Amino acid sequence: MSATSPTLAPDRRPLRFLTFGLIAVIGLSGLTARLVYLQLDQGHQYAALSTVNHTVMQPIVAPRGLIYDRKGKLLVTNVPSFTVKLRPADLPLDQRDGVVAQLAALLSMDPADINEAIDANPGSRFDLVRIAQDVPEATARLISESGATLPGVDVSVDSRRNYLTGPLLSQIIGYEGAIPPDQYEKLRAEGYQPDDLIGRAGVEQTYETQLRGVYGTEEVERDASGRKLQVLSTVADPKPGDSLELTIDTQQQKLAQKALKWGMRKAGLRRGVLIVENPQTGEILAMVSLPTYDDNLFAKGISGKQFKVLANDPDKPFTNHAIAEHYPPGSTYKLVAGTGGLADRKITPTTRIHTAGFITLGGTRFYDWNHAGFGPCTIMCGFAHSSDTFFYQVAGMLGANRLAYWAHQYGFGKPTGIDLPGEVSGIVPDDKWKMETLGQPMFGGETYQAGIGQGYDVATPIQLITAYSALANGGKVLQPQVVRRVIGPDGSVVRGFKPIVKNRLPAKQSVLATMRRAARNVLLVRHTYNLVDMPIVMGGKSGTAEFGIRDSKGRLPFHSWFVAFVPKHAHKTKSDPTGMKAVSRTDAQLAVMVFAYDSQTLGNAATEIVKYYLMLHFGIKHDYRLPQLLRKSNFYQTSN
Amino acid sequence: MGVLSVEARVSSWATRSVGAVWRLYDLQLTIYAVLLAAFGLVMAYTNSVEDGSAVLDAESTFLRGLMWAAIAIVVFAAATAFDYKWLKTLAWPIYVANLGLLGLTLAVGSGVGGSARWVSVGPFTFQFSELAKILTIVVLANYLSARQGRLNSLPSILGACVLVAPAWILVMLQPDLGTSLVFAAVLAGMLFMSGASLRWLGALGAIAGAMVPFAWTHILHDYQRERLLSFLSPTPDIQGAGYQLYQSLIAVGSGGLTGKGLTNGTQNQLNFLPVQATDFVFAILADELGLFGALVLFALFAALLWRVLLCGWRSRDPFGLVFASGLATMILFQVLVNVGMVIGVMPITGIPLPFVTHGGASLISLALGLGVLQSINIRQTRAEW
């Protein structure tokens, strides 16, 4: 058995045993004394502490409203998503780096993004901070099970937005994002939580209040330091947010995107806009701004790196170029001078004005794009051929302030009021504007430039289509809208659709009819090449606008524009072979505009894109496109 | 009857009747231990109820506690049946295995916030530093009992320190301040009880005291310092390091004389504690069972310590005396420091409350220690005193 040596008698020391026992007795007595003090003497005080802040009311997140297109097609849903959050108070400072590194590895994130999220937390240290959304289930389980090694980290099932159409509608629908720290104070009063998401772009932003719904309230048990332990009861159920029905027709949006993408690819364009509007109501049927982004990136949690790449892209994919940037409108703006000249009786429909290669004012030559001029021209001729010298003279007759007056009547120089965030107002120069801005009145030459949409003039694509819609519908300047109706969670209509008339043009119907016929004449004189050959009647106006810096040969880069309106019964008839009768009416069903940024092409790229969109829209099989016009060229005078 | 020779004792044990073995078996010791473990299970039950999980959920603290208790009973029985004298033979292999397990913990272990304390074994995680406490007691008991009578010499005392040092360092590296303090206490207690010179013990204590400032700045981590200091703070920083203590004091204080009743505690869901239901379980006990419950617990610990010391006193083998001293020191030290921490008179260190803290390693290590003690009891005749 045992291999040990014979055992000695143990060396028992009674005094030491006694001492040990004494230490035990003193120790346990000391603890008892302290317990008596805490539990009996101070007991009431602590009992009060443990119950006073015991229950609190806390909001329950309401399901966010959904978004549909005008035909009821679902565009945005909510899907369950594992969300990883962190409570900074529970994360000891010396462990932060380790926990962040561990989380970053588990979530395949950049540690810098996590640190940024923690530091940007608008709430207190006890409020949860959103770290990652849409975490794969396996990862979420791993994280929630390693709670011991990841102090302060919390995994919950939230819902996130699922943008079913992705980049197709990102510019319109937008996305949700964290509350900016500087806005939290204000939003907290409205019941927002520090880790709430809020609409940060598109209709997600403009209709935030409706989509958000009303948060419910629950009574929760908390510990004495204010942290949630359990839900005791639901005091008020959350009221789900209202849903939105867009004016957008997803099918038309797809066709518009297809047409714009084709033109941009052919012409090598970097930015472009295509808007389709119902000119009778102001409903936007399609609005494409390229380049774009995928709003699902935000719903799933965009990384700082991805965000920076998109935010630093010189072509600004986050920007809806249709509304948030203004550009010189070029010859499309001749609508303003033409309408003003006729309405102010500076010219009549039959007034002939001599057009030449240039006109001189104060010793300066103002050239026509056509250096030969067109000879004596009426408004029908001047508008159709887009004669610059014609409109210099009309602008001169009107003067800067009267020209500006008519621009304002058409809605230029101020936001259209479209229900999307970030709209800019454009500039309509007049003496007052120039005095305020540059301290001088308008010079005559500047008024000339203003008459042809150059110089100080800048406008947004949405302003341009609003103006031409007003022309097409007989003078109603409508507020464009992208949300048709707001639908309650029970299916009731919270807000129906109603066209909003911002202004009625103070011009006789005959004036507007003349301008519409002039727009038809643009096609008839083949200024827009074969557009007139399409089986659809339309009026339109092209524009090319110089901008930027001259190249070595003294030529400027330019943007191209085209805006068109299509009457109700658009197909050509024998009784109206020119389509003049059709455009005389005010029943236009469709307005389309394209803006092609920096389009250094042989022909007008925007016109080709509008043409292609209309082919797709009307299902025209014959291909009228002229891709050769989209070849690279810097000779902008080919089709002004 | 007179004292039997070793050979006679050894051979007589084999032929001894079951009844005779039972007379030597310390039933009281076992009963107090079982009652303490039952206390632990009751606390595991109340915790499971308040967690909101079904009590018999596979993941519930209670079910895990039951499983660990079952394993602990098996370990206890096995250790009792095992002839403790083999431990003397096996002292060196045990010593090496002990260091190996601690090294393994460092290498593959996981723990709270970057520390490495637990090793996963199948579905269970196991904290080897708990087992290391008992194994270290075994090794020290062997060393000190072999040197009985020579413990007045400094080399013998230093030898004991050197023996403990590697395990102590490995535990500090985890870092596990609590366990390393237990090692130090156990070493001191065993030296003291085995008759080491008080003069040298005093000198060693003074040196250790002098090293505290150095350890404070160079060995302890910030969070350890913060936790150690938080109990000194008159107005605890309730949003920082003092948070656990603040919650713990509210729990204990609001318990009053009789407590709020099991599962009725309001402060007891110490979900905010990273080590909830483990090191702070006494706070829940005091909240729900009040001062009475706490005193019953103290009484059981006192009774258990009494029986453990009595086993040591009666042991005819110096190994038994020294081993019992180590075990008693370990239990007493952990009770004083853990409860003291919960009620704000001791700094916060990760030291479990024996039997009550929900942790398999702690319970099984205690079962092993008490089993060895029973093995010592039943394998010798009673000393005549």
Image: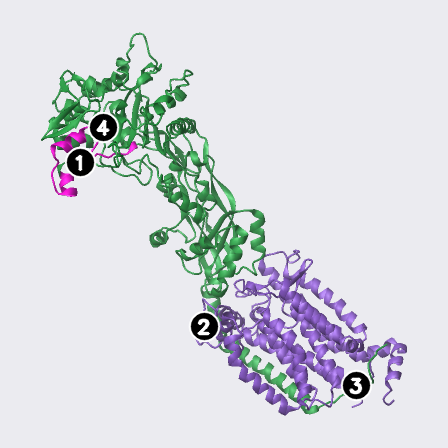
Chain colours: A green, B purple
Nearer to the camera, A312 or B248: A312
Q: Are marks 3 and 1 on the same chain?
A: no
Q: Does the magenta stretch include residue A423?
A: no
* Mark 2–mark 1 CB contact (< 8 Å): no
| N-term-proximal mark, 2 vs 3 | 2
Query: Along the line of sight, which residue is nearer the eye, A434 or B134?
Result: A434
Mark 2, residue position:
B236
At 52% from the left edge and 63% from the top edge, which residue is drawn?
A: B272
Secondary-structure class at tag 4: helix
Residue A601 is left or right of residue A255, and the answer is left
Q: Mark 2 lies on which chain?
A: B
x, y (%) of residue A306? Answer: 44, 45
Q: Which mark is residue A333?
A: 4
Q: Residue at x 65, y 83 (%)?
A: B189
Number of residues whose C-alpha sits closer than 10 Å to that of mark 1, classed few (under 14), some (14–19) or many (20 or more): many
Q: Mark 3 points at which residue?
A: B316
- Identity, as a three-letter code, of the amino acid under mark 1: Pro
Quarter of the image for residue B16 reads bottom right
